[in-house]
Image (cartoon, helix red, strand yellow):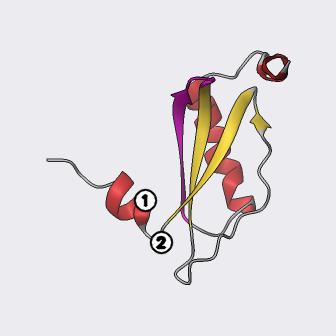
Amino acid sequence: MANLYWKEKKTDRDTTIRMLMDVLPDYTPSAFKVRQEGDDSGTYMCIYVERTEDKKEVCKEIPQKFEGWRTIVVFCPFEYIKYVMDARRE
């Protein structure tokens, strides 16, 4: 039955990522990044939110469904996005 909750038309991927990037500053003062990912349950929007320097998770409750997409929040270490996710690969 849970799959019926997620079975609605989704906004396209790029538009959804752009919309999430626009609203996320209202949810967290920390650095964040949004990527489409997937698992055995299908595709979803994964929101990476950095913890603060003193390791606190600062983020308001993000809706589980956004524009038809399932959303997952992953808390990562301070400056992880800068040094790992956005690092240039050579």
The dot on residue 81 is 1
Q: Is residue 83 left or right of residue 36?
A: left
| Residue 21 place in picture, x, y as percent | 61, 48
Tell me the chief SS of the magenta region: strand
**Mark 2 crowd level (few <14, some 14–19, many ≥20, 10 Å Cα):** some
Q: Is residue 72 left or right of residue 4?
A: left
| Residue 75 place in picture, x, y as percent | 58, 60
Q: Residue at x 47, y 71 (%)?
A: 78
The relative height of residue 27 versus residue 63 in the rendered view (above or below) is below
In the picture, which quadrant includes the N terminus?
A: top right
The dot on residue 29 is none
Q: Is residue 41 magenta?
A: yes
Q: Which residues are magenta?
A: 31-42
Q: Which residue is mark 2?
A: 78
- Residue positioned most to the bottom: 54
Q: Residue at x 38, y 62 (%)?
A: 82
Q: Residue at x 68, y 64 (%)?
A: 28
The relative height of residue 24 versus residue 1 in the rendered view (above or below) is below
What is the three-letter code of the residue carrying label 2?
Phe
